[in-house]
Image (cartoon, rainbow, N blue to C red):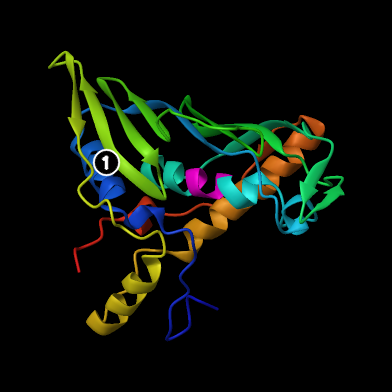
Amino acid sequence: AARVSAGHLVCAPFVTLSPTYQAMSRLLQSGRIGRVLTARAIYGWSGPDWGPWFYQGLGGGPVFDLGVYNLTTLTGLIGPVRRVAAMSGISVPERLVGGAVIVPEVDDNFQIVLDFGDAVFGSLTTGFTIQQLRTPAIELYGSRGTVQMLGADWQPAGYEVWENDIGAWTLMAETAPAWPYADGLRHLVMSIRNGVAPSLRPDHALHVLEVMLLALEAGRDGRTRDLTTTFAPSETAQVASP
């Protein structure tokens, strides 16, 4: 429906619009760290104490609440996933939510492994099981270097790069500390005004959705799942400044 519509379907999250994400994407395309071989991502916290739906039903749990950000970032930077595997479980059997004790129905602790093909692998740690964290949100390890996103991908704090040719880390300070994670709304309006298609493509979002759904299944039975959706890397192309 989106393909044949005169309008646009724009899906959250909007992490691919941040200046830090865009800078990292250009760095990868320039070949400064070589071919990405391994990736790691993490996003979690102790979990909401409001809204029992966070712990119920298909839409609940940390993968849909938190992991969606990292999965959008990783696939945007590396490309589509071919296979997914996962381990998951309920680590906290009771939660105090809205002043009442509830029993979670969905897993709150996930380790997800992503196969991007050609022996390129990634891992995602997410859960309502992390009190605090102080580690890069995204780590990409290439054949000639490393790039790491600092902060969270919905609220970046710059990035750092290791290049074998230089033999040192280079810290790139955050250039847009006030960047809003709801920036997709601005991007959509600017795209309409300028008569161009938004870079936030529904095929990318659909692919991330399938990764999440299959990760839930894989976490339950331990079996690897093959992806049926894909997207063209050009669909996460560079975004021009407004």
Residue drawn where x is 19% and y is 63% of the image: 241
Q: How many marks?
A: 1
* Mark 1 Cα-neighbour bin, 10 Å: few <14, some 14–19, many ≥20: many
Q: Position of residue 32 (x, y in %)?
A: 19, 29
Q: Residue at x 26, y 84 (%)?
A: 193
Magenta residues span: 67-71
The foreground one among 65 and 145 is 65
Residue marked by disc 1: 24
Q: Quadrant of the N terminus?
A: bottom right
The image quarter containing residue 163 is top left
- Residue farthest left in this picture: 166
**Residue plotted at (68% across, 41% down):** 215
Q: Quadrant of the C terminus?
A: bottom left
**For residue 146, side relative to residue 226 (left or right):** left
Q: Based on the displayed image, in which of its 4 quarters is residue 192 positioned?
A: bottom left
- Residue appearing at x 25%, y 56% in the figure: 238
The part of the image, by quadrant, that contains residue 191 is: bottom left
> Can residue 228 be seen in this snapshot?
no
Q: Main secondary structure of the magenta part?
A: helix
Q: Is residue 76 left or right of residue 223?
A: left
Q: Does residue 175 show up?
A: yes
- Name above or below for residue 59 compared with residue 214: below
The residue most toward the front is 99
Provide residue 54's location: percent of width, then percent of height: 72, 54
Q: Amino acid at mark 1?
A: Met
Question: Which of the two residues, 242 or 192, is positioned nearer the viewer here?
Answer: 242
Q: Is residue 187 above or below residue 69?
A: below
Q: Is residue 102 left or right of residue 173?
A: right
- Give the image location of residue 83, x and y in percent: 60, 36
- At which x and y percent is residue 69? 49, 49
